[in-house]
Image (cartoon, rainbow, N blue to C red):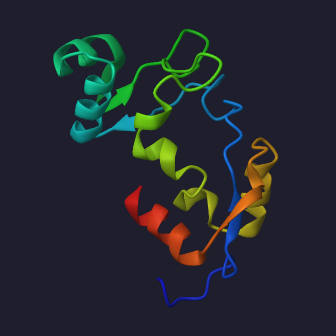
């Protein structure tokens, strides 16, 4: 895909403003790998079992962070409380496959994210790497 022509040939701008709009208000899933569970557990000075019992739910044998009753991520409190250890899903936002299907979809999603189309310009290669990683 690296050599394929994509609509974001010249890259895209994104800089997280840490507003939390992508972390709050809507139910969903924040998938976490075993490595991420280990890293976040260490960061929080918890065993992985304690972390799992307190912060994870099992969805078809895949783990997701739980949410607060209002739909906010369990780790959102006027900002991400685990920002330096946040899951890959969070790190690669907004460069997800579904967001990059077309410029129209990107522009529609950017209406709810003040960091999109602003700040740091990511190259096509960096964006494709995020897409592959996630």
Q: Quadrant of residue 60?
A: top left
Q: Is residue 4 above or below residue 126?
A: below
Check the picture and name the quadrant holding the C terminus. Answer: bottom left
**What is the x, y in percent for residue 47?**
18, 17
Q: Describe residue 49's horizontal placement relative to residue 79 as left or right.
A: left
**What is the x, y in percent for residue 112?**
77, 41
Q: How many marks?
A: 0
- Residue 86 visible in image: no
Q: Is residue 16 above or below residue 30?
A: below
Residue at 24% in and 15% down: 46
**What is the x, y in percent for residue 34?**
22, 37
Residue at 75% in and 68% down: 103
Q: Describe residue 12's horizontal placement relative to residue 97 as left or right.
A: right
Residue at 56% in and 25% down: 27
Q: Is residue 37 above or below residue 2?
A: above
- Residue 33 visible in image: yes
Residue at 57% in and 58% down: 95
Q: Is residue 35 above or below residue 109?
A: above
Q: Describe residue 26's horizontal placement relative to residue 114 as left or right.
A: left
Q: Quadrant of residue 69?
A: top right
């Amino acid at each position: 895909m690296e050599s394929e022509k994509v609509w974001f040939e010249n890259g895209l701008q994104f800089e997280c403003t840490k507003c939390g709009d992508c972390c709050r208000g809507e139910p969903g899933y924040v998938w976490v790998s075993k490595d991420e569970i280990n890293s976040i557990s260490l960061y929080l000075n918890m065993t992985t079992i304690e972390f799992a019992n307190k912060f994870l739910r099992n969805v078809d044998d895949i783990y997701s962070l739980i949410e607060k009753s209002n739909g906010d991520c369990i780790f959102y409190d006027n900002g991400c409380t685990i920002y330096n250890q946040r899951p890959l899903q969070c790190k690669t936002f907004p460069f997800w496959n579904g967001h990059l299907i077309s410029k129209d979809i990107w522009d529609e999603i950017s209406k709810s994210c003040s960091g999109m189309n602003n700040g740091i310009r990511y190259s096509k290669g960096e964006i494709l790497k995020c897409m592959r990683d996630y």
